[in-house]
Amino acid sequence: MSKELNELDKAFEKAYSIACNTNKKLPPDIMLHLYAYYKQATKGNNYEQPTGDVQLRNAFKLNAWIQLSHLSETESKQEYINLVNKYLK
């Protein structure tokens, strides 16, 4: 299992790098999903208030993250990778 997890972590880091360095303009709902899956994968259910000046946007971000509370770190990482592969590759 640790080898699988290691492979997942490598794929997650690669997907994160692709997402951070893309010039593609993604629809807001896809960006929100990427944010939420990333947060659930890296922070779990340890919610924190998103930073920024736009309160409504922060509320949407936090809500999207909370909606993924049923997913494990592993599931969240895989969903993040799936989104990156679908929209950014």
Image (cartoon, grey):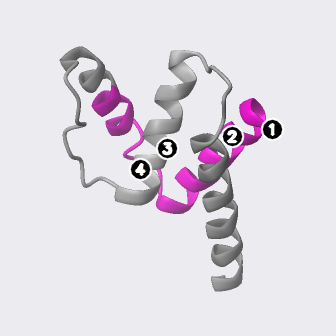
Report the residue marked by disc 4. Answer: 40
| For the residues bearing labels 3 and 4, Cβ distance under 8 angstroms | yes
Q: Residues within 10 Å of mark 3 (few under 14, many from 20)?
A: many
Inter-mark Cα distance, 3 to 4: 5 Å
User: Which quadrant would the C terminus be assigned to in this image?
Assistant: top right
- Badge 2 amino acid: Val
Q: Position of residue 36 (x, y in %)?
A: 43, 38
Q: Position of residue 22 (x, y in %)?
A: 66, 36
Q: Residue at x 32, y 22 (%)?
A: 60
Q: Give the residue at mark 1.
A: 89
Look at 51% across and 17% down and name the residue there: 28
Query: Marks 3 and 1, Cα distance to the nearest angstrom?
Result: 18 Å
Q: Position of residue 49 (x, y in %)?
A: 19, 39
Marks 3 and 1: which is nearer the front?
1
Q: Is residue 12 above or below residue 23?
A: below
Closer to us: mark 4 or mark 2?
A: 2
Amino acid of disc 3:
Tyr
Question: Where is residue 25 shown, x and y percent of the image?
Answer: 63, 20
* Residue 84: image tag: 2
Q: Are marks 2 and 1 in contact (CB under 8 Å)?
A: yes
Q: CA distance from mark 2 to mark 1?
A: 7 Å
> In this rendering, is residue 68 above or below 45?
above
Question: Which residues fall within the magenta stretch?
Answer: 61-89
Q: Which mark is residue 37?
A: 3
Find out whether residue 55 is within the magenta segment.
Answer: no
CA separation, marks 1 and 4? 22 Å
Determine whether the residue tagged by mark 1 lies in a helix, strand or loop: loop
